[in-house]
Image (tube, rainbow, N blue to C red):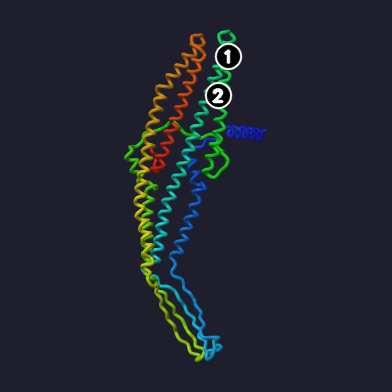
Amino acid sequence: MGACFTSLLWAAESAAEAEQPKALTLQAAVQKTLQQNPRLYQFDFARQRLLSTRQTSDLKPAYQLGLELENFAGTGEIEGADSAELTVALSSVIELDSKRQSRVAVVDARLDAFDLERQAQTLDVLGELTNSFIQLLSTQQELALAAEAVALSESLHSTVQKRAHSGAASDAEVLRARAMLMQSKIQKNDLQRRLQRQKISLVRFWGSTTAEFTTVEGDLFAFGESRKFSTLYDQVQQSPAVTVFASELRLKNAEVRLAQTQSRADIGWQFGVRRFEATGDAGLTLGLSVPLFTDSRNRGAVEAALAERNALQYRRSDHVLALHDRLYSAYSQRKQFIAAHQQLKQNIIPDLEKALIITREAYERGRLKYQDLITAQQELLGAKQRLIETATAAMLNQAVIEQLTAEPLTN
């Protein structure tokens, strides 16, 4: 009996846990994304490729083993193989002007730039994740507002029906109230479907196709105090989106140095042993070779590398100006939407709520028309919808600022 009771109790607790909504926080979503996002996971393979390239670049010139047979199968005195000369030689190249070190320096600079690019790409992915999370949080608020709209429409429909039964309202008003109730239910159903779509859009960030959570947890209306714009702009100039240019400059300098090293010719050498079949003797051979006009042939490559390095400075300046514009736009719009939100919350919505109560009481007493009550109700719902929209816009702009600065906006 005790075991049976324990099993029933465990089953009841499991059912209660299953009924409880699973809430997903932004922090949990970020952790999942950092661990499982396919776009970020590809960087591991790209880094491994660069490390393999560095290993190859650090190799010394290869050795070559050559075999050469001369003066055989000829005519006259050298007919047959009696006059053949067989040479076995080992050859390679002597690299001058630190070419190998320059190749390695280029790959090292690419690795540095790669790490910063990875950080910038991570910020982009997390920015997209935050936007999707905010949109989902906003839809949840709209769904709650839609439920309130349904409740208001049901109350209105009930009130109109009572007045119609007493002869104080026409059947047309009843039909209009019922139509409004149906429209509010349709709106609620549409938001529920949108919520499901947004959940699937969110879970793709960690490589999933199924949403294991029921709701997202967060405060859409908690803005906090922002730091000064000048402080934020300083942070932007230290963010990976800008510092990557300094790393790219080091890469371009390394590429220029590598191109300059190619202007100095390498010395090819060959050392071997030659056997003379006619006498049975053997002798050593030594050969050196140097390409001609290497400097003039390589001048174009050096100039191209210098041009790319010089152009990078202007690209950085243009990029910083674009970031400044984007940061200021997001900073200004955030303040604008927060101000509008506070006006709606503190003044407009309380007045409209009181107005709806007064209008409903006056309608029930026959002092106001049906249209007056509808207008009061729609104005209140519209203001609450605007409240959600301003909060969402403020949060989206805050996400942009945090993505640009790579730091939390509020304290």
Q: Residue furthest top?
A: 167
Q: Is residue 238 visible to the viewer in this orientation of the structure?
A: no
Q: Amino acid at mark 1?
A: Ala
Residue in front for this viewpoint, 241 or 11? 241
Q: Which residue is mark 1?
A: 172
Q: Is residue 351 left or right of residue 313?
A: right
Q: Amino acid at mark 2?
A: Ser
Q: Residues within 10 Å of mark 2 (few under 14, many from 20)?
A: many
Q: Residues within 10 Å of mark 1 (few under 14, many from 20)?
A: few
- Give the Cα separation between the discs numbered 2 and 1: 18 Å
* Identity of the residue drawn at 46% across and 43% down: 126
Name the quadrant containing residue 393. Answer: top left
Q: Is residue 232 left or right of residue 82?
A: left
Decide: is 283 above or below 136: below
Q: Position of residue 372 (x, y in %)?
A: 49, 15
Q: Which residue is mark 2?
A: 184
